[in-house]
Amino acid sequence: MRGGLIAAILLASPAFGQELVPVPSGQPVTFLDAIWNEPGPAGLTARFRFVAPQIAQQGGTVDFDTASADMEDLCNTYALPRIETTTGPRPAQVVISLSDRPVEFGVISPEATQFFEAYSIQDGACLWEAF
């Protein structure tokens, strides 16, 4: 972690790998962590990171389009309810990421397959934002 700027918060989750989070594709997805104190291009950004082994380049069965629908669902059904119950400043942006294995935030991991999507919050829902 870089210079104490990152605050990873495990939100309402048992130890990694124990909480399967349902997604539209049905692929097994587990919550890894949430990072709240890293600024993003749109201001305060909340990052919710998940592990989804089926997106792997080698042997994976879930493509980006399918994973993208899962990420939007994770934003609306997993991230937003947790953001709504927190105190303090609200994030301007939510980033949902899927990786085929746990990876350390901010560390280049060329062996890992990772997908990211960014969303703004409008009218109580996640709205996809192009990076």
Image (spheres, rainbow, N blue to C red):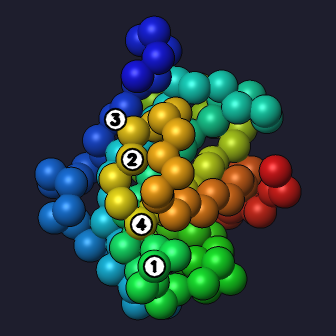
Mark earlier in primary sequence (1, 3)? 3
Q: Residue 19's x, y, as percent?
A: 22, 66
Q: What element carries label 2?
A: loop
Against 37, residue 112 (above or below) is below
The answer to whether marks 4 and 1 mark residues whose Cβ atoms lie closer than 8 Å is no
Please say if the residues under marks 1 and 3 sit with CB atoms less than 8 Å apart: no
Residue 9, labelled with which disc?
A: 3
**Residue at (82%, 50%) from the top-left corner?**
131
Expressed as whole percent of the image width and height from the top left, the position of residue 105 reads 46, 37
Mark 4, residue position: 100
Q: Which of marks 4 and 1 is nearer the N terminus?
A: 1
Q: Residue at the location (81% across, 56% down)?
A: 129
Q: Of residues 114 and 79, which is closer to you in this image?
A: 114
Pick whichever of labels 3 and 4 is earlier in the sequence. 3
From the image, tell me which residue sits under label 1.
Answer: 58
Query: Please, what is the three-letter code of the amino acid marked with disc 3?
Result: Ile
Q: Residue 46: in sight, yes or no?
A: yes
Q: Which amino acid does label 4 sit on?
A: Asp
Residue 72 location (% of width, % of height): 62, 70
Mark 2 highlights which residue?
A: 103
Q: Distance between the residues labelled 1 and 3?
A: 31 Å
Picture residue at 60% right of the left edge, 62% below the top: 115
Q: In this view, does 94 lie to the left or right of 84?
A: right
Tell me the element at label 4. Answer: loop
| CA–CA distance in space, label 4 to label 1 | 10 Å
Q: Inspect the image, locate mark 2, and give the three-letter code of the amino acid beneath it.
A: Val
Q: Residue at x 48, y 35 (%)?
A: 107
